[in-house]
Amino acid sequence: MYVCNCNAIRERDALAAIDAGAATVKAVFTHCQTRPQCAKCVCDIRQMIDDAQVSLAMAAE
């Protein structure tokens, strides 16, 4: 599934960036070697980052 249609960033690409340490939307775009264009995906990517951080915190308990 595409998270960002403008840059053809797939969900798995965004998750790979987050797994590699991207903690901000900008870091995800940088990891994918793109820049935000229309910004419709920013909320979805931010949610993916938040979900990953919650999962990591729960795993650490």
Image (cartoon, rainbow, N blue to C red):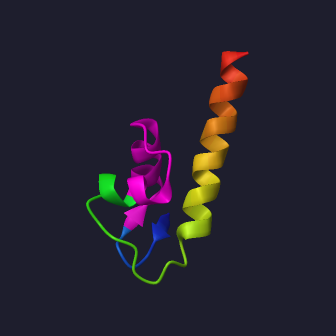
Given residues 5 and 32, the one toward you in this image is 32
Residue at position x 43%, y 76% in the image: 5
Residue farthest to the left, as pictured: 33
Q: Which residues are magenta?
A: 9-28
Given residues 11 and 18, the one toward you in this image is 18
Does residue 20 appear left or right of residue 54 in this picture?
Answer: left
Residue 32 found in image quarter: bottom left
Q: How many marks?
A: 0
**Does residue 18 show up magenta in the picture?**
yes
Residue 53 found in image quarter: top right
Does residue 26 appear left or right of residue 60 in this picture?
Answer: left
Tell me if residue 9 comes above or below residue 28 in the rendering.
below
Residue at position x 50%, y 63% in the image: 1
Tell me if residue 24 comes above or below residue 58 in the rendering.
below
x, y percent for residue 22: 43, 45
x, y percent for residue 29: 37, 60
x, y percent for residue 30: 32, 57
State the quadrant of the C terminus: top right
x, y percent for residue 52: 60, 40
**Does residue 46 show up magenta in the picture?**
no
Determine the main secondary structure of the stretch shown in magenta.
helix
Tell me if residue 41 comes above or below residue 58 in the rendering.
below
Residue at position x 40%, y 53% in the image: 27
Residue farthest to the top, as pictured: 61
